[in-house]
């Protein structure tokens, strides 16, 4: 593992864990943090079977570090580079072959909300506070929030959040399709770890192909998306994990996939 200054990164039993480690500023994102975040996902993506993202302390991520943004604003090229780093980090999350789980407690606001949107599965503590706060400060999203959010919840709900800066409760995030389920705050870490371990025991190649099919097919017409699924299905049927899965089914046992 690389040396990390802004994160804690580990890999154990196929589960990668990335912890934003700036609790003194509610894990706000500065240039170094997002650079490390991209590097961590690139590193873990090569071997991890599931990746868990969380925040140190009481909060997931309160957004971009506005002190850093304020300094970068004096130099347009520096500001553009910072936004490119943020989007590079979120792109790395979406490109990660392994499922990415966000464990969201406390604040997930603005850039932290955008980070949450880039993850595959989201568990939210019942005390979590979620929303896009850019409009409250005369700002607009720069980490993909104006583009991912409408794709996740539709135009009306996205604009409602973006234009008003209103916050969502955990149960609302689930009902809108932004999170998988609500978990009591004291159980969040245990539930997120259990989900990551469950995914890590499954076929890495199978989960990676399903993730790519969902993402790639979403931007295609339905007939082309189904044709893509057929081609990927045919390719996957030659995978060794399929041999193990079918053998386990016939023998009435749990499959043991390579590397699990």
Image (cartoon, grey):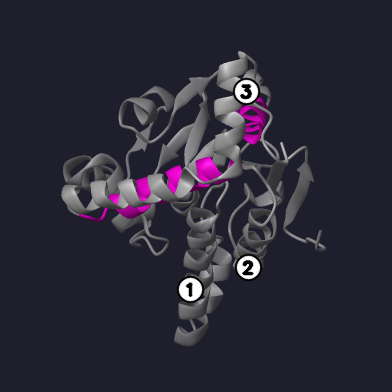
In contact (CB < 8 Å): disc 3 and disc 2: no
* Position of residue 240 measured from the top left corner of the image (x, y, whole percent): 60, 42
Could you tell whether 43 is left or right of 212 in the image?
Answer: right
Q: Nearer the viewer, residue 230 or 111?
A: 230
Residue 188 drawn above or below residue 100: above
Residue 208 x %, y %: 51, 47
Q: Earlier in the sequence, mark 2 or mark 1?
A: 2
Query: Mark 1 = which residue?
Result: 84
Residue placed furthest toward the top: 252
Query: In the rendered image, which quarter is residue 96 located in?
Result: bottom right
Residue 215 on the magenta segment:
yes
Q: Secondary structure at mark 2?
A: helix
Query: What is the x, y in percent for residue 174?
Result: 38, 27
The residue shown at (65%, 43%) is 49
Identify the residue under disc 2: 35
Q: Which residues are magenta?
A: 191-220
CA gap, disc 3 and disc 1: 33 Å
Side of 168 relative to 31 (left or right) = left
Q: Quick one: SS at disc 1?
A: helix
Mark 3 vs mark 1: give the one in front.
3
Quadrant of image for the C terminus? top right
Label 3's element? helix
| 3 or 2: tag closer to the N-terminus | 2
Q: Main secondary structure of the magenta part?
A: helix
Residue 41 vs residue 131: left or right?
right
Q: Circles 2 and 1: CB distance less than 8 Å?
A: no
Estimate how packed mark 3 is, as few (under 14), some (14 to 19) or many (20 or more) residues with alpha carbons within 10 Å.
some
Count of marks, rendered view: 3
Question: Which of pointers 3 and 1 lies earlier in the amino acid sequence?
Answer: 1
Which quadrant of the figure contains the N terminus? bottom right
Residue bearing mark 3:
191
């Amino acid at each position: 593992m690389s040396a990390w200054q802004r994160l804690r990164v580990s890999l154990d039993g196929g589960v990668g864990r990335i912890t934003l480690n700036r609790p003194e500023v509610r894990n706000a994102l500065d240039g170094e943090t997002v650079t490390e975040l991209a590097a961590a996902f690139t590193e873990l993506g090569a071997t991890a079977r599931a990746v868990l993202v969380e925040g140190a302390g009481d909060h997931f991520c309160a957004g971009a570090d506005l002190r850093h943004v304020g300094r970068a604003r004096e130099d347009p090229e520096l500001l553009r580079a910072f936004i490119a780093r943020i989007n590079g980090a979120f792109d790395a999350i979406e490109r990660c072959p392994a499922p990415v789980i966000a464990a969201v407690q406390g604040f997930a606001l603005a850039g932290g909300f955008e980070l949450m949107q880039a993850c595959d599965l989201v568990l939210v503590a019942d005390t979590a506070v979620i929303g896009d706060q850019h409009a409250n400060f005369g700002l607009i999203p720069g980490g993909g929030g104006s583009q991912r959010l409408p794709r996740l919840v539709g135009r009306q709900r996205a604009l409602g959040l973006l234009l008003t800066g209103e916050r969502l409760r955990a149960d609302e995030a689930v009902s809108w399709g932004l999170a998988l389920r609500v978990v009591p705050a004291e159980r969040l870490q245990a539930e997120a770890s259990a989900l990551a371990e469950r995914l890590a025991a499954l076929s890495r190649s199978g989960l990676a192909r399903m993730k790519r099919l969902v993402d790639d097919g979403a931007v295609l017409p339905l007939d082309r998306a189904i044709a893509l699924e057929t081609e990927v299905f045919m390719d996957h049927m030659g995978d060794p994990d399929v041999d193990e899965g079918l053998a386990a089914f016939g023998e009435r046992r749990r499959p043991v996939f390579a590397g699990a």
